Amino acid sequence: MDACLGGLMGISHVTILGGGWCGLAAALKLQKAGIQTLILEKQPQVGGLAKTLTWRGFRYDIGASSFYTTEKMVADEFRALMGGTYQTSLKRNQLWFQGRWVSYPLNMKSAFQIPLPTLARASAEYALLQLRERVPLLPTPKHKDQRQHYGYILDQVMMSEYARKIWENPVKSLHPSWSAGMKKERSPIEQLRELFEGLFRERNSHTATFHNPAKGIGSINDALELALLEAGGEIRTGARVHRIFAPDGEVQSVHYHCDGGEHRQQTDYVFSTIPLPSLLTLFDPLPPHALTENAFQLRYRALVFLNILHENADVDPFLHYYFPEQRFPFFRAGYATPVSADSMGHKHACLNVEWFLEQEAPLFDADAHELFDRCREQLEETGLLQHHRVLELDVHREEHAMPVLNKRNIESLRQVKSYLTGIRRIRAIGRQGRFDQSDLLGTVRMGFQAARGILDERSSSRRHLTAES
């Protein structure tokens, strides 16, 4: 026990595999607490899935264009990082729902755009929930404080296909904060009044917490990187880890290639944010073969961007278009922002169409022209590509964008996590490391919590030794 406590107190260096938001957040908190950190990122820049790219004079975001949090600690951290660019005007969304555009999150205008059968279905479900609440013999649904709100039910009805398309889960299994219409329960009379006064409001308590950096989501990466470097942390991009030396079940060093040479980093602890199958292949000695085979059964989907440059200047780069219906192979589209006034943006437009594809799917390796052929008619149907002339196409892919957790993978995931728990001085965190479907807020939270865990254990160890002496 004394050796264990002494080991915790002796943590002076942490190596972090992967420079996404989770790794950056963990490194920043550790570095500020006096623990030296090294981030190893195989890409040319940090940020992971959330970054901003440029193409043909236009700027567009990968992964997410907004950062959402209601947690004061996280919001304060990012507000300090971003300064005056932390929050800009809210971006607006539209859904292509049953052949028409609907403003989203739901507002007064949406009430006149939603088809009557959808409103009738939501109203019937709402009435049934009200009846269940007032008749003791009927079962009361879980989370009734959220689900009895009419806007939440309407949101479920409209977005159920979207939830299955993106997360492969029914919408009822998602966290309630995902719904744009979440509010506390009100009396029946208040609910009827708030149907128009509260539900259909442009800025509600949920959407007001979205933050859109003026220079794209990648500017948050730049701010995190700068803050970490100023605190004394080290970041090495273009670094490929090829070995985690862990004799007797305890990590001692990390070996990687970078800048044309091979490096060995002696370390006291490792945080890994990389995909679990990739992580297991790095251990020396290697895990049992059956375990690595199980790890490679874990499925991920890739995020694929189709960029369409065309002649059209009358577009709105602050408007996102969502396609919740399963018949659309893509899930979102939006116009990129011109990098500068002198760019091509004054006479051309760049439409970005986003797809989630299985990495084993035939379309994953398709070129830009094949992807365009698969979506051209549907984009014309919605009016996004009417009266245009396509000038150029391009495709960008992000592998391991979305872990897909289903019943087939649960046992494999349990075995992998059980094995990692038995390796001392390493912890898998983040969306990839935990095989988690969390959003940006979730990954940031995991980074902060992982760092806090080490700091709390170190503090507890010091108190224990002081008490003994």
Image (cartoon, grey):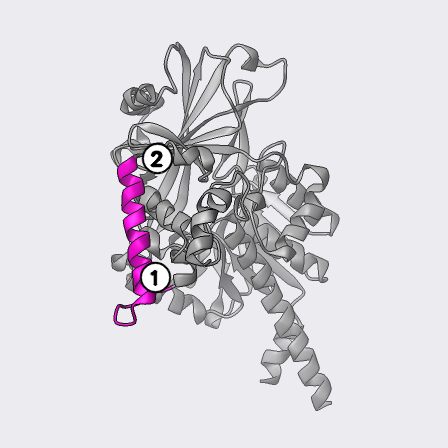
Viewport quadrant of the C terminus: bottom right
Disc count in the image?
2
Judge the density around disc 2: few (<14), some (14-19), many (≥20) Cα neighbours within 10 Å: some
Asked whether 408 or 171 is in front, the reply is 171
Residue 37 shows in the view:
no
Q: Residue at x 62, y 79 (%)?
A: 5
- The disc label shown at residue 114, or none: 2
- Dot 1, how many residues are within 10 Å of its Cα: few (below 14), some (14-19), or many (20+)? many
Image spot of residue 269 (x, y percent): 58, 64
Which residue was labeled with disc 1?
A: 413
Residue beneath the point at 31% across and 48% down:
123
Helix, strand or loop at mark 1? helix
Is 222 located above or below residue 178 in the figure?
A: above
Front disc: 1 or 2 = 2
Q: Is residue 197 left or right of residue 417?
A: right
Magenta stretch secondary structure, dominant: helix
Quadrant of image for the N terminus: bottom right
SS type, badge 2: loop
